[in-house]
Amino acid sequence: MGRKTSQKMRELHRYLGFFLAGIMAVYAISGIALIFRDTELLKQETTIEKTVEPQLTISEIGPAIPIKKLEVTREEAGIYYFENGFYNSLTGETQYTKMELPYLLDKLTHFHKAKSGQPLFFLNIFFGVGLLFFVISAFWMFMRGTEIFKKGILFAGAGLVLTLVLLFV
C-alpha cells in the first residue's frame, strides 16, 4: 500500500502542479504587488472627473465619489476641497486624482483579493485546497526512511519553526 499510495500522490502532485501553474504565477505576482499596496510603488496618477448628485452633505460626498475616509479641508462658495480634489455642491462636478496600479496588475490584485460575494471566490477556495494538497502530498514524494525524505522532514520542520517565529515575533 505504501509504494502504491506514494506513486499515486506523486502523479496527483505533478499534474495538479502543472494545472495550477498559471494561477500560482498570478498569486505570486499579485501577492508581491499587494505587499506594497500602502506605497506608491508601481502606481500611476489618474485624474477622475465625474458628475454626482448636487447638494450632498460632507458625509455623503465620500460614498458618492467613492473615496474612503474623505476629509474636507475647506469650503469656498459651495466648493468642497479635499486631498487631491474638489466637489462642487452646486453642479455636482467632482474632480480628483488617484494613484492606481496599471490595468493588468490591478486585475491580478483584485483576483487575489476576491471576497465571498464575488464569483471568483470559488476559484480562490479551489486554489487554497490545491495548495493544501501540495503541502500534504509533498510528504509522499519520497519513500520513508530514505536520506532525501529525512532531509525533507528537517527542512519542513525548519520552515515550520521559521513560520511560527515570523507569526509571533
Image (cartoon, grey):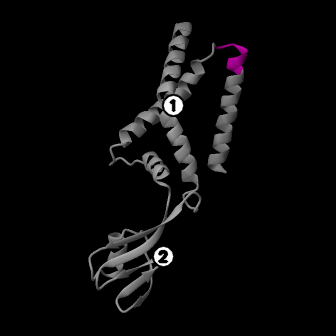
Secondary structure of residue under mark 1:
helix
33 w.r.t. 139: above or below: below
Dot 2, how many residues are within 10 Å of its Cα: few (below 14), some (14-19), or many (20+)? few
Q: Residue drawn at (36%, 38%), measured in percent from left and top?
A: 122
Residue 68 or residue 160, whichever sits in front: 68
Q: Sequence-wise, which precedes: disc 2 or disc 1?
A: 1
- On the picture, is 142 further left or further right than 96? right
Which amino acid does the dot numbered 1 rest on?
Ala
Give the x, y percent position of residue 50: 34, 72
Give the x, y percent position of residue 142: 63, 16
Secondary structure of residue under mark 2:
loop
- On the picture, is 87 further left or further right than 21? left
Q: Residue drawn at (56%, 61%), measured in percent from left and top?
A: 38
Q: Residue drawn at (55%, 13%), measured in percent from left and top?
A: 6
Q: Is residue 78 magenta?
A: no
Residue 156 or residue 72, whichever sits in front: 72
What are the residue bounds of the magenta stretch?
A: 144-150
Which amino acid does the dot numbered 2 rest on?
Asn
Dot 1, how many residues are within 10 Å of its Cα: few (below 14), some (14-19), or many (20+)? few
Q: Is residue 148 magenta?
A: yes
Q: Which mark is residue 40?
A: none
Residue at the spot of label 2: 84
Residue at the spot of label 1: 21
46 w.r.t. 59: above or below: above
Residue 93 or residue 71, whichever sits in front: 93
Contact (Cβ within 8 Å) of mark 2 with mark 1: no
- On the picture, is 80 further left or further right than 33? left
Q: Residue drawn at (43%, 46%), measured in percent from left and top?
A: 111
Q: Quadrant of residue 96?
A: bottom left
Give the x, y percent position of residue 104: 47, 49
